[in-house]
Amino acid sequence: LIERMRSYGETIFAEMTRLATETKSVNLGQGFPDTDGPRSLLEGANRYVLEGVNQYPPGPGRPELREAVARYRSRRHGIDLDPETQVYITVGATGGIAASLLSLVEPGDEVVVFEPMYDSYAAVISLAGGVRKPVPLRRDDTTGRFTFDPAELNAAVGPRTRVVMVNTPHNPTGAVFDASELEEIAKVCREHDLIAVTDEVYEFLTFDGAPHVPLATLPGMAERTLSISSVGKTFAVTGWKTGWVMGPEPLVRAARTVNQFLTFSANGALQMAIADAFENEEKWVEQQRDALQRKRDRLAEGLVETGFDVRPCEGTYFLMADIRPLGYSDGEDLARALPREAGVAAVPAKVFYDHEEEGAHLLRFAFCKQDEVLDEAVARLRRWH
Ligand code: PMP
Ligand code: GLN
């Protein structure tokens, strides 16, 4: 293994799911729903396969899906994308993130990231030979929200900075960046001529009416932002691994050039089914979001009753819980012990930080599960503590 990848072992999601299976735990670790997306989407995949959509799709993706993506971005956000040149389809958002960063980051270039950060960012930046400059998201004393200090964002930018990586709604904190936070990021990008890469995979999963605002809609940002999303969370089919990269033609072309040699193309039949779902299943997506909001409240209540200090969650399907009121301080130790001791699996937030001490006391619980499953997890936690 090349030297710069040696610090990356098995991902925390794989480790925790394996531990959950071994111990027959309720798995609130790795984030995936335990019910599938809309019936018409599943039937569509079936039908397209049987109808013969089984050979290589075009490298940039099936035109039907690229058009459907351009239409929903226009409908929801007023963003106009040419489906030919400004949208391309990848193997999950993970594939889009890899192709984007690998096409932009030269060895030695710096990438500003907000920590805690989703695990693939650090690994891909390392793969590109880049250097991460983490900006911490911390609890705001009055609102309890995770937010950043604009001064720390500015301080993270230097002469070698090339990219700012932005994830909203944010995994694992559940923060949804508001207009003023996004404007701070946009300002830094404009002033220092930086490119933004945004991970918006939870764009449809915001709660209590919080709007998802794509960074690309801010002044001066459309021409310098690659926006990435995927089907997994929106339609509850995380195993379908189909994502898309959207943005100005030169940046999309750069990422496409790299992607040709990472995966060439993604699954064609699924792309067709997803394109239909974007036209026909808008209602399902809204109902899913509302159901998840209720699940968030259900799990939060149970965790609070158990004694955790639960942080506000504005989007995604994760809750962050502070373990200190229960008398623990190291979330990594607790996450490894919890499956055996309590029969519940969670993810230690510490693994998403460069400054580990910032997140050592936090566990991330996924609430994208059936109510009975959430209730069982809470019952087990209450017996444990
Ligand atoms: N980004 C974030 C923030 C995620 O949480 C995930 C996975 N859940 C991904 C990217 C990966 O998405 P995909 O499965 O479409 O590759
Ligand atoms: N994104 C999912 C999570 O945060 C996990 C995806 C994966 O296993 N790589 O839990």
Image: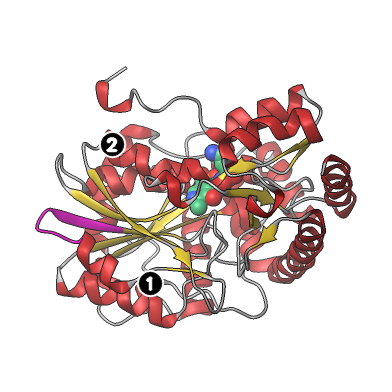
Q: Residue at x 21, y 36 (%)?
A: 129
* Residue type at tag 1: Leu
Mark 1 sits on what residue?
215
Tell me the element at label 2: helix
Please tell me the numbered disc located at residue 164.
none
Q: Residue at x 29, y 82 (%)?
A: 219
- How far is disc 2 from disc 1 in space, using C-alphas? 24 Å
User: Do the CB atoms of the residues marked 2 and 1 lie less than 8 Å apart?
Assistant: no
Q: Is residue 90 visible?
A: no
Report helix, strand or loop for mark 1. helix
Which of these two is toward me, 376 or 271?
A: 376
Tell which circle, 2 or 1, labels the residue nearer the N-terminal end. 2
Task: In the rendered view, tell whether residue 217 sits above or below residue 155.
Answer: below
Outermost front residue: 327
Q: Nearer the viewer, mark 2 or mark 1?
A: 2
The vertical placement of 78 against 273, above or below, is below
Q: Amino acid at mark 2?
A: Ser
Q: Among all residues in the image, which is located at the extreme left?
A: 159
| Magenta stretch holds residue 143 | no
Instruction: For the C terminus, give its image quadrant.
Output: top right
Label 2: how many Cα within 10 Å (few below 14, some 14–19, many 20+)? many
Q: Position of residue 348 (x, y in %)?
A: 58, 42
Residue 333's image quarter?
A: top right
Tell me: 163 left or right of 39. left
Q: Is residue 3 visible?
A: yes
The residue lying at 19 percent from left, 61 percent from top is: 157
Residue pointed to by mark 2: 126
Question: Which segment did they paint magenta?
Answer: 157-164
Q: Position of residue 225 (x, y in %)?
A: 30, 65
